[in-house]
Image (cartoon, grey):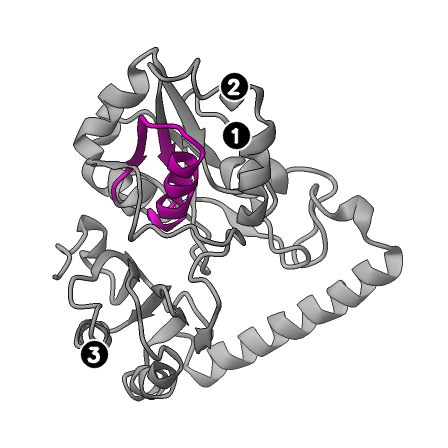
Amino acid sequence: MTAQPSKALSNQPVVVAALYHFARLADHSALQGPLQELCNTHGVKGSLLLASEGINGTIAGSREGIDAVLGHIRAIPGLAELVHKESGADAMPFRRMKVRLKKEIVTMGIEGIDPLKIVGTYVEPRDWNALIADPDTIVIDTRNDYEVAIGTFKNAINPETDTFRQFPGWVENADVLDDPEAMKDKKIAMFCTGGIRCEKATAFMKEKGFDNVFHLKGGILKYLEEVPEEDSLWEGNCFVFDERVSVGHGLRIGDDTLCRACRLPLTPEDRASPLYEEGVSCPHCHDARSDEDRERYRARHRQMLAEREKAALESGGE
């Protein structure tokens, strides 16, 4: 099952494919070597996670390379119906290719949560606005705090988690969710970047007795691709886990960057802070670092700039 190419792919030489699929893989470890070799052969980079519960990851490469890898994955028993989402980039957004073996393809850390058995109701991007605008809907952003900081849906609840492992604990202690019986007439609408975290988050909510649980099909990325900006209820940019850092409406690359010291996303406002120094510190990490740390980061940044300049000269300045 192929994805329709995003409008963001026009005039961009690198295809970025985000994918996941829950399936019972009998011997996922045997899939690692051939998949890594195929990606290397076609110059595809990124990260793929394999577990007994399925596959998850984001890869980037040429049109030919991406098609070859996706074809290989869909030929694996249980993964024929894998759906992926595409966007584009002007340059390769990953430095290497890694195929990793994991216990979970998205780590919640709760035994028995199986989206193949129970999951929330999928909502198409075109229908999402009506759901979250309903006053009887509680909207929950299942992503981590640093992701929410650069963009989210209007009026969404931020659980303020550092990792997805903390989400079940937040649900257990959230005042707004502490009485499933009182909430039987309420709808819970959940969303995440590409949809995978909501598979487990909605399954967890259903297990906890919440019946009217919904999630955004294809995640924020699909919403930003399909819903016109003038009709959108999204505010800000969406953090992505590669060198693009963020995307906005139409999956256009955003104006956020990464702090090379703490790896957190930085908005233009963050970069205007006196605590920001490129490659060295930002408002998120400045006070947690010593002067010795910052001097070490400065040396690393100088080395990186020198290597970048050398590479540009060797390529003729292209």
> Up-down: is 17 above or below 156?
below
Task: Name which residue type carries label 1.
Answer: Asn
The kind of secondary structure element at disc 3 is helix
The kind of secondary structure element at disc 1 is loop
**Can residue 227 be seen by looking at this rendering?**
no
CA–CA distance in space, label 1 to label 2: 12 Å
Give the mark nearer the N terminus: 3 vs 1. Answer: 3
Q: Nearer the viewer, residue 98 or 268?
A: 98
Q: Position of residue 249 (x, y in %)?
A: 30, 38
Task: Name which residue type carries label 3.
Answer: His
159 left or right, relative to 21: right
Quadrant holding the C terminus:
bottom left
* Magenta residues, start to end: 189-217
Task: Name which residue type carries label 2.
Answer: Val
Q: Quadrant of residue 26?
A: bottom left
Residue at x 75%, y 64% (from the top left corner): 298
Q: Is residue 50 magenta?
A: no
